[in-house]
Image (cartoon, rainbow, N blue to C red):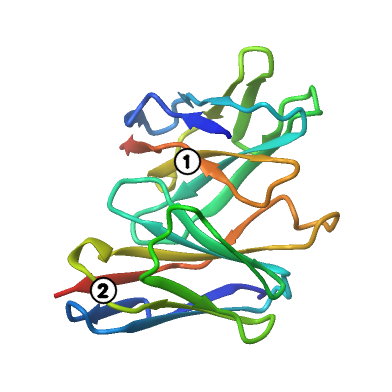
Amino acid sequence: AQTVTQSQPEMSVQEAETVTLSCTYDTSESDYYLFWYKQPPSRQMILVIRQEAYKQQNATENRFSVNFQKAAKSFSLKISDSQLGDAAMYFCACRSGSARQLTFGSGTQLTVLP
Amino acid sequence: DAMVIQNPRYQVTQFGKPVTLSCSQTLNHNVMYWYQQKSSQAPKLLFHYYDKDFNNEADTPDNFQSRRPNTSFCFLDIRSPGLGDAAMYLCATSGSLGGPSYNEQFFGPGTRLTVL
């Protein structure tokens, strides 16, 4: 069984500043994938960034990057140059290589202050 | 654009009155999922289909059923909705094992169910 923990129910950041959202996970699998999903208010969930566990290099997508610490089972999301449109609920998720299901964390509500 | 479509976006039903939510996809993905998401909580997987192979989560109540008549469509049936079933229901898809879209789930906009 997998568990995903997001210890920050809410975070806020000033526009144009940088914010880091925390996530820890636990899995007994050696092959797994980690994700950050964004769910804006009343809008659909979209994938922000993905990390394969076998890759040592941290994934980056434009202003979004991760800090993947495999030994510590930590997978944090850094948002640089925050924009008002980044305001959303962010979910960290894990999928083991043998499973189709995602295990989600409880989410972090990000507010971007103008 | 290839996408996941859910209809209706908002559904109101009465306590105990059966309701069906629908999901369609133009991605030609093998796997379709149904999640229940209550306010400010993580999505909770109810079940999923791999092609026609139905996979129920152990803690999904019998009140929830699903049908997948073809690759494109999947339905969620709630036989006797209770007040506790009021939630957002999310449909998602992913591709087949080994394919380029296997490792990502694509979500629809959700259907918000209200039970009166």
Query: Which quarter shows the C terminus of chain B?
Result: bottom left
Residue at the location (34% across, 38% down)?
Answer: A109
User: Can you tell which quarter of the image residue A107 is in?
Assistant: top left
Q: Residue B21 or A35: which is nearer the viewer?
A: B21
As helix, strand or loop, the secondary structure at mark 1 comes to strand
Q: Is residue A72 left or right of residue A3?
A: right
For label 2, the residue is B81
Query: Which quarter shows the N terminus of chain B?
Result: bottom right
Q: Residue furthest top?
A: A71
Residue A9: image location, x then y, percent: 32, 31
Q: Residue B88 or B45: which is nearer the viewer?
A: B45
Q: Is residue A29 left or right of residue A12?
A: right
Residue A104: image location, x then y, percent: 50, 41
Residue type highlighted by circle 2: Pro
Q: CA distance from mark 1 to mark 2?
A: 28 Å
Give the number of the disc on residue A91. 1
Residue A21: image location, x then y, percent: 46, 27
Residue type highlighted by circle 1: Phe
Label 1 crowd (10 A; few <14 / some 14-19 / many >=20): many
**Chain letter of disc 2 in the image:** B
Residue at the location (25% across, 65% down)?
Answer: B86
